[in-house]
Amino acid sequence: MKTCEIDCFQEEQVQEPCETIEHEPTAAAHVAHAANPTPNRTLSHDHPPYYEMITAAIARLKEKNGSSRRVIAKYIETQYTNLPPTHSALLTHNLKRLKNNGQIVMVKHSYKFPRSAHVPVSGNGTVNVPFDHNSVGSKRRPGRPPKPQPEPRSK
């Protein structure tokens, strides 16, 4: 048997037997084990990648002025289960990444597809390209045109 010294408040030391428990690790060992988990490379996602979920949400919602982040998040949460606890941060990160890549555009805090991605197709298979009035004629600069300079006189 082991003995441990325990200090009492009466300034005397008492020798008491200590129990040694060998079959159960301490709470500190549990915390250390949880803080340093072994890397487990198996990813168990029950949902498609975020870019697919975002594009599906924007396409399905079909809002004229685009869909806000909150509406996209609500749609994804209702359609897909077992999302990670960091869903909000992942959604924000992927929305920014898609915006920077040009796959979606942001207009007044709403996300939608760029116009070039949505070219309407008629029933006979021809592509209907919208007419752009700005491309016809010469480009005008903003503001008043400059005053004509008089020709210099020769002496």
Image: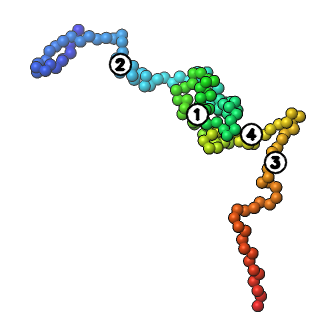
Q: Position of residue 134 (x, y in %)?
A: 77, 54
Distance from disc 1 to disc 2, alpha carbons, whole Å, reads 41 Å
First in sequence: mark 1 vs mark 3? 1
Q: Amino acid at mark 2?
A: Ala
Of tags 4 and 3, the one toward the viewer is 3
The answer to whether residue 21 is above or below residue 90 is above
Q: Quadrant of residue 13?
A: top left
N-terminal of the pair, mark 1 or mark 4, is 1
On the question of residue 113 being in view, the answer is: yes
Q: Nearer the viewer, residue 49 or 139?
A: 139
The image's colour scheme reads rainbow
* Numbered disc 1: secondary structure: helix
Q: Residues within 10 Å of mark 3 (few under 14, many from 20)?
A: few
Q: Earlier in the sequence, mark 4 or mark 3?
A: 4
Q: Are marks 4 and 3 in contact (CB under 8 Å)?
A: no
Question: Where, quadrant-wise, is the C terminus in this rendering?
Answer: bottom right
Element marked by disc 4? helix
The residue identified by callout 1 is 70
> Disc 3 residue type?
Phe
Discs 2/3, front? 3
User: Relative to 134, is 25 on the left or the right?
Assistant: left
Q: Disc 2 vs disc 4: which is toward the camera? A: 4
Residue that badge 3 annotates: 131
Q: Which mark is residue 27?
A: 2
* Marks 1 and 2, the one that precedes in the sequence: 2
* Circle on res. 117: 4
What's the residue type where badge 1 is placed? Arg
Q: Assess whether mark 3 and mark 1 are in contact (beta carbons under 8 angstroms).
A: no
Q: Amino acid at mark 4?
A: Ala
Q: Are marks 2 and 3 in contact (CB under 8 Å)?
A: no
Quote the CA–CA distance across marks 4 and 3. Answer: 16 Å
